Image (spheres, rainbow, N blue to C red):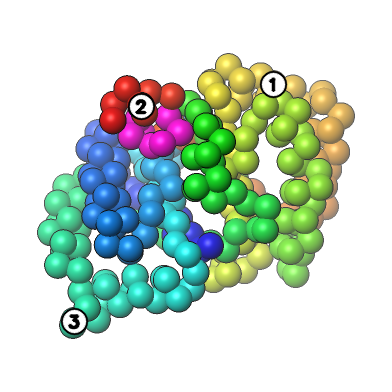
Amino acid sequence: MLYLHEMIDIVGEGSPAYMDTAVERSRHSESQGISRLFGVWRVIGSTNRWPRVVNLWEMDSWEHWAATLERQFLPDKQDAALAPWWKQALQWRSGGFDRILEPAPYSPSRDALRASGLKSWVTEQTILRTQPGMRADFLLAVEKHLLPILSKEKLSLLGAHSAPMRSDEVVLLWCASDFAALCASAAGRGTDRAWQDWQQLLAMTCLESETMWLVPSAKCFFHPLFKAQE
């Protein structure tokens, strides 16, 4: 698998409208084999800079991304529906920052999460930069040390990814069934021994990190109200 991670700067109160148009775009993209929308979220302003939206798109491989790029940039293969969608979306967005992500072997696919019946109101996203050359070791440590903590607290991993075009960068996403569960987890991280050990490992292996909490669109497959709105 390969992923496109987008952080979109939103104009004014345009987050709901932009999220809706991203979902609309995803229906076309998936029907045409361009990409699949893994999730779309808005940033909770009390946790990070806002207003912003995060999109995560899933593709099968680098070869799949090559075909997607051709649909965007090669005149004889361009997707005729893309330019009108971009023009429409400009009323709600002003720019952003994108990453291509490669998943760790244990990172779940969209189909696997769908099959699990996952439901979540809130996601925690952390972007980290490891010490030079330690990204692969860090992702192994996530599997060995962090996943058991998440499982114990009934938090679900959404993704553990490296950013091949960004030096030593890792993107982690996990989610909770509701806000109370994620807040309870955050409250205990200062005293829980397993979390303290994880934080110590972070301090030894990572140069910097940035965390934000995200709320998914109700049109995401894992949103608790998704079925009611289909």
Q: Is mark 3 on a helix, strand or loop?
A: helix
Say what amino acid the circle numbered 3 marks. Answer: Pro
Of callouts 1 and 2, the N-terminal one: 1
The residue singled out by tag 1 in the image is 187
Q: Dot 2 corresponds to which residue? A: 227
Where 210 falls versus 5 (above or below)?
above
- Element on which disc 1 rests: helix
Percent from the top left, x then y, of residue 13? 25, 33
To which quarter of the image does residue 170 belong?
bottom right
Along the viewing direction, whichever of 116 and 166 lies nearer the viewer:
116
Q: Which amino acid does label 1 sit on?
A: Ala
Q: Give percent across and percent down for residue 167.
A: 62, 68
> Can residue 105 be seen by looking at this rendering?
yes
Q: Is residue 7 above or below residue 224?
A: below
Q: Tell me which segment is drawn in magenta.
A: 217-223
Report the Cα–Cα distance between label 3 and label 2: 39 Å
x, y percent for residue 111: 50, 47
